[in-house]
Image (cartoon, rainbow, N blue to C red):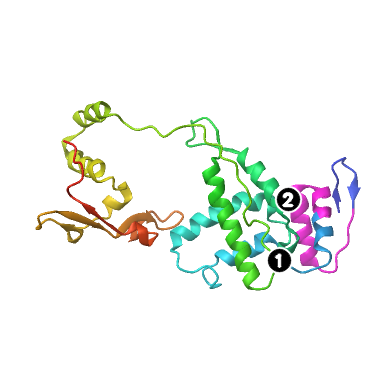
Amino acid sequence: MGRDDTGKQQQKSFTTQDKAEAFKRTVDRLGWEVAVEIEARRGGKDAPTLRDWAAKYLDPNSGILTGVDSGTRDKYATQAEHFLERLGPLPLDAITRDDVGAWIEWQLNQTWRRGPNSAPVKYSSSSVVFMHVLLSNMFKAAIERELVTKNPAFRAKIKNTSEHEPVFLSREQYDALYAAMDDAYKPFTQFLVGTQCRFSEAAALRWTNVISDTNRPYVRIIRTVKSAGKGKGKTEGVTKTKRGKRTISGTRGHPG
């Protein structure tokens, strides 16, 4: 039993307790009318909901998502919660391109805070792209396992909402910052600026990666500092992609 949007009490019967409890969770989350619509889409089928499939997809014991570390898996789980809030209760085979499009527009208008005292900002289009890619990959895996026949997230359009151009320090600004810096941090800062290396990559460097006994010194980037998983701090690992592994010449512009 439950109440619709007008407050009127409603009742619906199910063949199993599990189905009844699943319906109740949807009512509690999205309201009676939406829950009834989702149940109508299901049409008596037992296809898993997107939330159930996402949990299986991200489960390291399922064997579906391979080649990622625990930190990346936790990051995907966090990203997934954004589309699961809207699409999670829907059966996989009932989700349409319109559902995905509606979620994208909704997500672009949601806000988050960079810190407890910061003003709320809308999610950037690039952030939503990452969420969408994960959603699409989940459907690809479902197609491979014959749970669905099509991917409603495939090639969904996401408008560019970026309002700011990249901002870089001028040479004068860098010189002022460098002059005010503690001497202990100056060599590392010079390395970052002179090589354009990411902080996480530079922090994972070892002396064996630095080749200085040649006419042209260079550094091999093969590792990076990354998240070890939710609440587990940081760890070192290989770069995410093959392109991340590269050689940086010591002859590049070196400030100082």
Q: Which residue is mark 1?
A: 48
User: What span is in magenta?
Assistant: 11-37
Q: Residues within 10 Å of mark 2 (few under 14, many from 20)?
A: few
Quarter of the image where the N terminus is located: bottom right
Q: Is residue 178 above or below residue 85?
A: above
Q: Position of residue 231 (x, y in %)?
A: 44, 53
Asked whether 39 or 167 is in front, the reply is 167
Q: Disc 2 or disc 1, which is closer to the eye? A: 2
Q: Nearer the viewer, residue 221 or 206?
A: 221
Count of marks, rendered view: 2
Q: Is residue 19 magenta?
A: yes
| Label 2, label 1: how far apart the Cα atoms are | 19 Å
Please say whether residue 105 is one of the residues in the magenta stretch: no
Q: What secondary structure predominates along the stretch shown in magenta?
A: helix
Q: Report helix, strand or loop for mark 1.
A: loop
**Quadrant of image for the C terminus:** top left
Q: Residue at (22%, 42%) from the top-left corner? A: 194
Q: Residue at x 68, y 58 (%)?
A: 152
Q: Position of residue 68 (x, y in %)?
A: 45, 64
Amino acid type, residue under disc 2 in the picture: Asp
**What's the mark number on residue 241?**
none
For mark 2, what is the residue?
98
Mark 1 closeness class: few <14, some 14–19, many ≥20 residues within 10 Å: some
Closer to the N terminus: mark 2 or mark 1? Answer: 1
For image coordinates 36% across by 58% down, the residue present is 243
Q: Nearer the viewer, residue 88 or 249?
A: 249
Q: Is 31 left, or right, of 123 in this rendering?
A: right
